Every structure is written in C-alpha cells, then in structure tokens.
C-alpha cells in the first residue's frame, strides 16, 4: 500500500521545490509517494536563517501540516534544520508522523559514528542548532561546528564554490577534530553529500534526505506496529472544538 | 528619566490586561512606565497551553515587539511561561531588552534557594517547561513539578479553589521533595504568591511579576552600563532591508 | 532487490528462534529476508541476564557476525537489550549494518514521546541498561525503570501472569511517573506490546521488533545513500591479516 | 526609601576602596546608598587569588556581613569573583540579600548572549572559577577562558598595559571561540569594561559592577515582593544562641 | 618506614578525639602513625553543620595543616563530610597529601557499587553535600539522600536510638531506591558501619575511616611513585614570602 | 598477613609478563604477593586495541578471574585501559576485589589535579576510552586526548622514539590545554612515567601501576573493613549451579 509523505519547505518560495523533488524521487522508497510544497509564493521569508523569520512562517507551516492530516498524509517533514515547531506539529497530527532534519540527522549519525561534525552556513545559526544538540541528547557524540560563511540562499549559487568551501570545512573537522560523520546542517546544502562522502571516506548526511528517509521509517513502523507519537503529555492534541474556535487552522 | 516597559499577554484576549496592570502598578519601580497589551481581540488563541496555540500567536507577538521598539520602549516582557520566541524577539530588538517569565523566575529562584519546585496547571505543559530548565541551566537546582489539574483559563475562575490546590501542591513539594523555593509556573497563576509565601514560609515566585521585575533590572543596566543583548551570533538582527522585503513586520 | 538481515539470539539455545521468526515475519518489510539464529545448541548460557554470561557468548556472537558478513548479509541485529559487543561487531562489519535493541528502542522512543519508561525483568539488569541510557543520550527523556521480578527465562512461562505484571508496571509508570512511551526492556518480553498498547493508550515498544525495524531502516539507507558505519576512529576495522593471524574468526 | 548596600572587598587592604566607591557612585541607583569596606588594614591577605588566602579572610568576611545585618543593611556584595563563602553569608543573613560577582555576572551574561568568555588574571584561578560555572548552571553557555598573565595586584599598575592585554584576550575569544559576551573575571579588572565594549561591539561585564547592580535588584525585589533567600534547607540560619555560644561573630 | 598521618577534627572540641583515635588504631595500616587533633578547646564551633560555622574554623584548619607540613607529616585528613577548604589545604601542602571524607567515600563507593545512598543527619546538610556529588563526578552513581533528623552532636548521644534511625534510613534506601552501597554522610556517625553492613548485606562506609584509609593510600603512592597533588594550576602554592607577609600561617 | 593479587595481561602473549613483573616488584607493598599472567600462548589476540579483539579475550579473562577466586587470590587487575569486562569479573568474584587501569587512573588523577590529559597510542582508541570518562564521572576534570600515533605493540619497540613522542604530546597538553596531570592511557606505555614526571613537573600516571596500587588499596580495605563489591543489583553473582550448568568457567 502506498504511503504519502509531505516535505514542506517552510518558506514563501517555490524555487527549491523542484530540486528537492528530483533528489527525493531518486532515493525514496517504492511504496512512498513524496509530495513537496512550500508555504506558497506569498510575501514572506524566503529563508529562515533568523529565528524571527522562522517565527513568521510557523502559522502557515502548522496549517499546512493540518491540511496534510486532513488529506490523509501518513507523514510530514518540516524541511528546516532548526526543526521549527516540531512539538506544535506533533500536537496537531492525529496519527500522522512528523519529523525534521536535525532530529533525523542526529539519530542516523549516532548509529554511524561517534564524533559528529556539523557544517553550517553562517555562525549566526550555531546557537539555535546547539540547543537541539542538547534537546536530542547528542552532546557526547558531538565534535565541532564548521561555518562556511554562506547564507542560506548562497549555497546553490555556485556549486563549485560551495563544494570547495564545504569540502574544506569537512576536511578540517576530520583532521583536526576527529570527526567521523559529517552532517550538512542546512537543508539548502542539497546536492553535495554524495560526491563529498566519496572523497572524504566518511558518511556525509544531507539533512533533507535524512529527514525524508527517517520519516519513511517512522511512517512504516506506525502503519505496521501502531507506534506513533504518544498523545499523552507533551504531544497531547488540543481539543478540536477549542482549536476550531481559536481559528488556528483557518487560512486568511 | 522614565523608562517604558511593555508587558505582552501573547493571546487574543484583553480580559486579563486589567488584572496584570493592577498588579504591576503596585510593584513596579517608580521610574518605570508599565504598559500592558495583548495581541488584540481578533480571532485566535485565548491561551497558549498547547504548543500549536503558542505557535499561532508568535507572528503577532513579533510585530508587537517590533512596534514597541519603534515606539522607543526600553523593554518588553513576553508574558508566557514557555518563554515563546525569546530568541526571535531579541533578534528584532535593536537596543531594547526582552525577557520572559521562565528565564526571570529561574534566575531569581537560583539566587534564593537550591531546590526549586514548579507548580503547573496541567501535566501537558511539563515537557515544554522542562526543556527550558535545561536551556537555562537550572537542572541541578530543580526539585519537582507539581500539577494542580487546572487549565490556563481555570486559574482565575474560583480563587479559593485555585488557592487550595496550589497550596496543597506547594506543601507537597516542600515536605516530600525538599523544595525551598516555589515558582508558580503559569502567568495565569496571578494573585496568589503573596498570601502563599506568608503561609508557607518560603519564597513563592509569581511568574509575571518576576518577569517584569527582571525586565526592569535588565533595562536599568542597559541604560546605565550599556549591557544589552549581544548582537553577535545568536541574537544577530536580520538585515533591515531583507526583513522589510520579507514583510515580517507588516500588519495584515 | 531483496535484502538479508540476520537476527542473532546471542545464547546457546534454539528454543526462542521460532517465536522470533514468527513475529518478525508478520512485521518485516517485503524486501527483507529475515533470518534468525542462535549461537547453537552447545553448552553455554541460555540467557545473558548476568554480564558474565553475556561475556561468554561474545566470541561466538562475533564469529556469527563475521559469517553474516561473509554470506552477504546486509544487516545484523544483536538480539539482547544490553546491546552486547555493538562496537566490536561494527568494527568487523565491512559494509554491513549492525544494531541492537536498546539503541533501536531508545531512538524510536525519543521520536514518539518525551518521558520514557523501561520495564525490566529483574533489578539486577538496571545498572547495565542505565549505562546505555547515558551512552545513547536518553537521560533527559528518561522517566523510570519498573522491574516485574521475572528472570529472562520466566517471561514466556505463563503469558497471563507475565502480562498482568507488565501491565501493572506500565500503569504505575504512566500514572506516577508521567511515562508517555513504554519500552519492554528485554527481548524475552516478546508478544506483549500489541495488546498492551491498545489497553494503555501509549506506544509500547517491543525491543526485538524495534531492533529489527531499525536494522531494516539502516540497511535501506545504507543501500540507497551509502550511509554506513564510519570506518574512521571508533568503528575502524582491524587489519584483516592481523585478525586472521590472531584467529579471531576461527571456529573451534 | 533609601536602601543600603555594603560592598566588601574581602582583603586586608583599603587601597582599592576609593576606586570602587567612585565607580559605584557613577552607576548605582538613586535609592541606594552604597558603602564600601575592606576587612581593615590588619595583617592578612591583600588579595585572594589563592584559595588559602581566600580561606583566611572568610571569618572576618562573615563578621562584616553580620555587622551589616545588625546595622540594617539591605544587601551585601562579597567582592571577589570566587564568590567566597556565599552560602555561609546567606545563612547568617536574616532578611538581607547577599550576592557576589560570579553569580551576578553569569546571571546577567546568560540573558545577554549564549557564548560567554571569561578573561582571568592567571591560569591558577581557572579551576576554582570553573567549579562555579557548573554550580551556577552556565556550562552550556560557556565559551572559553582567556588568561592575561597578570596577578590580582597587577591589573591596576599600568592601565595601558592591562587594557592591551585584556583587549587582545577578548578579541581572541570573539574571533576564535565565537564569544558574544565577555566577563572580566576578577574584581580587580575595574575600569576597563566601558572602553572595551565600545571597541569590541559586544557586552563586557565588569564583575564588581555586575554584582552591585544585581544586589540592587535582589534588594529591590526583596523589599517590594518579600522574595529573599529561603531559610529552609541550604540557607537555614544557625540557632542564634548556639552561634553566640560558639562566638562566631565575636571580633578578636 | 613509618608514615605519619594527621586526622583533624575541624572543631574547637576535643571530646571526639579519643573515639576517633580508638577506631583508627584498629583499622590503620602498620606502617602508619595516626595522630588525631582538633582545633583546640578555644571558643568556637563545636560542630560545622552550618556553612557559617564551617567558615569560622577554616583559618585554624589551614594553620594546622601548615604545621603538619612543617612537622613532616605525610598526609592530612580534613575530618568533615563537607570536605572544607580542600583546595586551600592542597595549595599549602608542599608534598604532603590532603584528602577528606566525601572525596574518599565517593571514590571507594564508586568501586563497590553503582547506586549509592547517603545517610545524613539533617536535611540542612544536603545541598552542600549535593554540590560535592557533582564536584566529584558521582551524580550518575547516586541513589538518594536519607535524613535521620539528628544534629551532628546528637549521633553519639544514644547509640541505640541512632542505630535504629540509621538502620531504618538505610533499609528504606535499599528497598525503595535500589541502593547497593550506603555512605554514612557525617563523620559523627562513627561506630555504626560494622554492625550495619552485617545486617544489611551491603557495604556501609564510615566517612572518617574511608578518609583515613584513602589518605594512607595516597600517601603510599606518593612515597612510592612520586604521585602527589599537582602544583600546576588549581593547587599551585602561594609564593612563600607573600604567604608569610600576609601572615596566613600566624597563630594569634 | 600476605595478600595475593593477580595482574592479568588479557592477551595471548607472555612477552610482556616479565617487564610487568619487574616493574611491579619495585613498587608493590610488602604485604602483597603479585602474580602476573597472560591468557597463555594460544592462538589469539596479542593486543586488544580493537574492540573485537578485546571481545575475543573476555571468556578466558573471566575463567582466569574465576581461577584466581578459587585459588584464594585477594584481588585481580584486568590489565587493559579499556577496563574490559569489569562488571562481569566483579559478578563472578565472590569476595575478591577486581579493578582495572582506567578506573584506577581516573580515581587517582582526580585527587591529584583538576585538568587531566590522556596520552593514547592511536586515535582509534579514543571513543572507547571516552565512554569510560563518562562512566567514571571524570568529564568535568578532563582536559584532552593526545595521540602519539603508535600501535599497542609499538610502544616498546624503541624507547627513545616512544619517549620523545609521549613527551611531546604531554608538553602540548600542559602548555595548550592546561593539563595538570598526565595519564599514559595504555598499559603498554610501561616504563616511561618516572622520567617523564621529573621532566614535566606534573604527575604522570602509569596505567598498570595505578591499577595495581589501587587494587592493593581495595584489597586492604576489603580485608580490614569488609568493604567489597556490593553483591546487590549490578554486581550480583549468578546462581553457582546455573553458571556451572552453562559451563561458563569450563576450560576447553
């Protein structure tokens, strides 16, 4: 039976959807239909490097998740390495899986190695990612951050330049910080992991792809074994009537 | 010189503003003008016990913070014990102070005692608050959570019932978990701390009041000593032009 | 393309193989061939509740892993909740995945809830499991251990008795320790999760099944994306010639 | 109503009192009378860089705190970055506030940034300060120590030399360790913060001034809200009669 | 070659010296001369349950340590479970060993079991002891505190009563908190460990005796292997001339 | 009364026994008979740098420990810095002490200094040792690892080369990482500590010798005070009959 997963690029920009879709089609499981969407082409942040940009996209993100639920999606990926609004999205998911790149990458990386480095765009993003390192219990497997000095929207401008910068950062992490796994810590670092890991000889995780594959996994065990997000305590759903009354799923 | 602080009740409901204002007027510093606002009486969450409600109010919260900045406020309090969007609000604050109840309460409590208990409304809220216990480095001073089984909007319904429940929870924390400081871990638990601490003989922190007083303090040292939120790394502001272009401060 | 996973019950006893096989066949992915083996019916530990029993089975476990590698298996599960010899088995696995129940259960549980309880047989086993809670970074998501006072070989003696004991322990964890996910922390607790989670309303993880499903996942991403155990540092393989010279894979 | 705070330079040396007083007068709140004292000009340590010096000054420190209490002071600052005898002083303070530079600086710094560097005089002092980093829960916000190779009594010898050394250390912390807040981790580093933070563009905290301002804050909330050090458990006061009988407040 | 160790009861009271001496003589190594002293019968604290009492005895403690050094003692034990002034005493010890009951008990207990309970006199003492649990890295081996409601000077008043209370607390720790080692967390709990551990079937550590034996060990390896307190960084000694000039070893 | 300790070099190689014996005879206590053994000259690992080699030697290690117990040994040292099978060996030891180099070195180092560096042979070994740093609660006293690029069997090939490499690594740790104690983190680094610590001026711990001395200590307190490994919970022994039935102590 086919299962449906929605990858949400949580920005007001459709430019990347095609690239995500192409990458995902190549690596998805056969029994998965992968849909890719953004928040639309409305005025609004085109990247969420700043926490205040991230904040502005969350309501539409949540509405998109709600609609995925209503449209019988089996899983959703919140496509940003800050894992924005993960708890909120799990609250509103009834029996649908929700995951995100940092949770997924850290999970996988911890099974692959013991000294994990994260390549980020700009140093600005480090503190927020660091918080998730503790949240997900990865602090004792963490090696180092390396910043390549590129904004979110810069990564795809010149592949050669980006590749050179990421390669240099990854080599530095491996040689000087004993990294044995590399995470590309921004979903915009799409399209580099494969060549890099061949060159470097260690696993290089693409954050979006990690999230998609981990979503497939969680969806699969949910269907097969009934293991989904606990609806007790932290991920308890709001009373539907109250949520409706508060209009939290209304589109303007 | 008078300084202006804005307390934001981050909900679409003006019902509590008057009560907050009255409490704050009694305990504020003389050189502070305290303003209290909500996000307006629009359709939207009237409380933010659920993370998905919290998420929905953040954009208007951020716009309100931005307007406070534009209107020369010296400080802002985000009036919810989850400390929602604290990083985002600090990013957009140029040279204005932003704080919130959990940061403030934990800070003060740590100078008053060593075994701090938190009285919450419902168990639902514990995991999100627990995350902040780690975020603010209070885990080694933490004693216990006690839930009184009241939703956010229940606290003010019957003061006597609420008082009895909170008192009972606090006594339990003191007697069985060696608590030496009590935090009322919801801004809706307004109006109870004073009587309680007289009865119990240990400090009882009201989360809103703690946040206001801590804001006064941060504002004061900001003015006097130039110590404000660092604009390097984590609280770096977005480029104004980009923020404008993304329309993140536009009112619909 | 079919992939082959070997589940190793690391004891000298074939009695459980059939039960494991039956359970696994029901829940495995279509593209997986699942093989189940023990270490044979030789004299030796029939359970590994004691660390000194666990120690005695490790060489044959490693040889079995090596043979799986030689026989083109894609993944191996070490079927004991202590995750015995996980590093050693990953060292000798060239490009084959190795995982184990605690790693798998903790990983899955952390995506499902935030306050995870573990039901163990006897208290004897708690300290060794506790070490893995820290190893896998689950300490901040951990709720409580509950012991049901049953040895490894007792779980399957009287299903009704076992079910009653586990149910009671799980209810205690949920009601008094705010557990939102239950892990059955012994592979011998097979056959209970399904009924239990229906009754309890929270996810109940069977450790063996969690390990098998997580192995399927790691195998799948290994095949699709080339993400396998890093062979740098911690999981570096020994030089084949030296390993041969030391006879570490020789069957007596 | 005026409130009285006593800043104690816990050494047998009056040389610095005037400088402290002058700095404090410029930055104190209007409703605060700030008194500055040392332990007198008796024979004894003139600095407390060594823990054994620190130990020798504690009895007179405690007596000074007791006298402050008897003289209706509202708050006391223990003027050394090791925060010596903080628990002891809080025990003997009835309803008077006691704080100290490390507690105050760490508290403030954590609200201003997320990667805090500490500039110390000599490496000798690092382990004792490090212990307080854990005590106050600042380990996850800590960036690095930088030592400038100056003893406590050297800082004020040649302002230009000191400034150059501190500036260099701070720049190193910012550039190579991503520091976003600088703490001058010795009360003798007085008189440098202002110029430094202008140059560096990040907050630079003077430890004495941080302590004084935090004391003002704690005094203010104590007066206004009744929030003082809990007298239960850790800060419980000794029975007055016993304390008298043991002569612990007697001047020789 | 005989080695000399000084056990210092850091109070102004000789009443316990004889009891300590008698216990120590029975269990010391043959090549050790054990001396027992207090700070003399001067006016001053007769117990150090309060941190402010503890503070008052430290200068005389340090002078006593210095004299031990001058009199060619090989080791010193600071006889209080708070481990008062351990760093300071190590600074002034040239090549003499200094240790204390908490360091010693925690060290030994960690080699004997994995879930260590501490029986204290009054709850007042818990926060200060808890700080040492973190200082010595014992937090992951810690089970629980149990308070018996006895002041330091009460323990020896009625052995039967004390024994009953301690036994009850220890049984509670073993049965309800899975304790596998018991530490008697006050040096005044002398004379109970032997009978208790026979009854309880788990090791029961007497804090003073643990400290003495650990001191013997550290002295022995110091003599044999040259392993003493590092004089670099944290335990660096003050310049002798300065120490003399500051009069820190002068008796009044 | 003489006590007997067995040092087990857990490899199939007698080459090092003589060197260990000679070193131990020089530094052991008079009342100790020190025996040194390997696992015999059978085919098998001659070093245990790889976890899979380590795994292969454990059954014979356990049998050797069992025989030591049967032959009235008072203590056993597992002579490898990974502390292999420490729990298992403690389980099977009735009233015999078992310890190992990492436990012993970390314990001693923590009483000697506060910033401990470990010199290892190859980086491969770091992750497994790092796990023990957390296991033994040394993370807050840890400074840095330095690898000298030598395999276990290389250390004794050319003393001059080895000495030069270790010296260089230790100096680097002291100068650039503020190390105040050095641990030679491989038992094969025998014969270097003495000269090194003279040159470097900080304690340099030989891992084997630390283990032997700590074993002497634990044996001595066991005999004198009855403090041995708790047989409750973690170190509970298996039922003798079952162990016999499982043949876990049978020699092939």
Image (spheres, coloured by chain):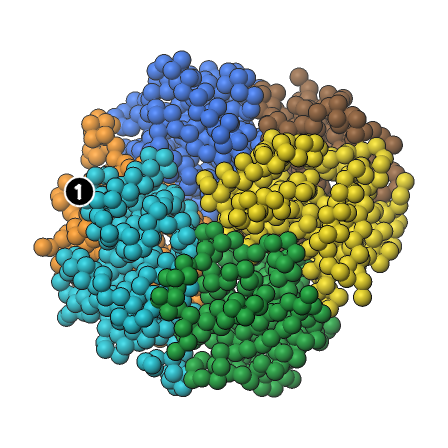
Chain colours: A yellow, B brown, C green, D blue, E orange, F cyan
Outermost residue, front direction?
C241
Residue A84 placement, left or right of D42: right
Residue at image coords 90%, 40%: A252
Residue at image coords 19%, 54%: E220
In the figure, E142 relative to F234: above or below? Answer: above
Task: Tell me where residue F11 appears, x and y as whole percent.
Answer: 30, 66
Residue B80 placement, left or right of E195: right
> Based on the displayed image, in which of its 4 quarters is residue F19 positioned?
bottom left
Residue D191 placement, left or right of E31: right
Residue at image coords 40%, 73%: C250
Q: Chain of mark 1?
A: E
The C terminus of chain D, quarter of image: top left
The N terminus of chain D, quarter of image: top right
Q: How many discs appear?
A: 1
> Based on the displayed image, in which of its 4 quarters is residue B87 positioned?
top right
Q: Would you say residue D119 is visible in this rendering?
A: yes
Outermost residue, left direction?
E1
Task: Tell me where residue A4 appears, x and y as whole percent.
Answer: 80, 57
Task: Tell me where residue A16 appears, x and y as whole percent.
Answer: 76, 40
C16 and C207: which one is in front?
C16
> Based on the displayed image, in which of its 4 quarters is residue F197 positioned?
top left
How packed mark 1 is, by other alpha carbons closer than 10 Å (few <14, some 14-19, many 20 or more), is: many
D72 and E232: which one is in front?
E232
Residue at image coords 33%, 20%: D154
Task: Tell me where residue A157 appears, x and y as whole percent.
Answer: 70, 31
In the figure, E97 relative to F54: above or below? Answer: above
Which residue lies under the disc numbered 1? E69
Q: Secondary structure at mark 1?
A: helix
Q: Would you say residue B128 is visible in this rendering?
A: no
């Amino acid at each position: 039976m086919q299962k449906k997963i929605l990858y949400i690029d949580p920005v007001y920009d459709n430019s990347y959807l095609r690239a995500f879709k192409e990458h995902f089609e190549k690596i998805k499981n056969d029994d998965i239909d992968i849909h890719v969407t953004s928040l639309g082409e409305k005025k609004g942040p085109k990247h969420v490097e700043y926490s205040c940009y991230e904040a502005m996209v969350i309501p539409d993100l949540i509405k998109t998740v709600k609609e995925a639920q209503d449209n019988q999606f089996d899983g959703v990926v919140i496509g940003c390495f800050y894992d924005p609004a993960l708890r909120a999205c799990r609250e509103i998911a009834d029996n649908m899986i929700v995951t995100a790149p940092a949770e997924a990458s850290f999970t996988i990386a911890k099974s692959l190695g013991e000294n994990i480095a994260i390549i980020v765009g700009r140093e600005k993003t480090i503190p927020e990612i660091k918080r998730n390192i503790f949240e997900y219990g990865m602090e004792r497997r963490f090696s180092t951050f390396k910043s390549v000095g590129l904004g979110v929207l810069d990564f795809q401008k010149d592949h050669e330049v980006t590749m050179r910068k990421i390669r240099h950062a990854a080599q530095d992490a491996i040689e000087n910080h004993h990294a044995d796994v590399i995470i590309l810590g921004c979903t915009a670092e799409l399209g580099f992991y494969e060549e890099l890991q061949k060159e470097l000889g260690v696993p290089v995780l693409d954050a979006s792809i990690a999230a998609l594959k981990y979503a497939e996994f969680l969806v699969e065990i949910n269907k097969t074994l009934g293991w989904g997000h606990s609806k007790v305590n932290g991920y308890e759903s709001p009373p539907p009537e109250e949520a409706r009354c508060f209009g939290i799923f209304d589109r303007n």
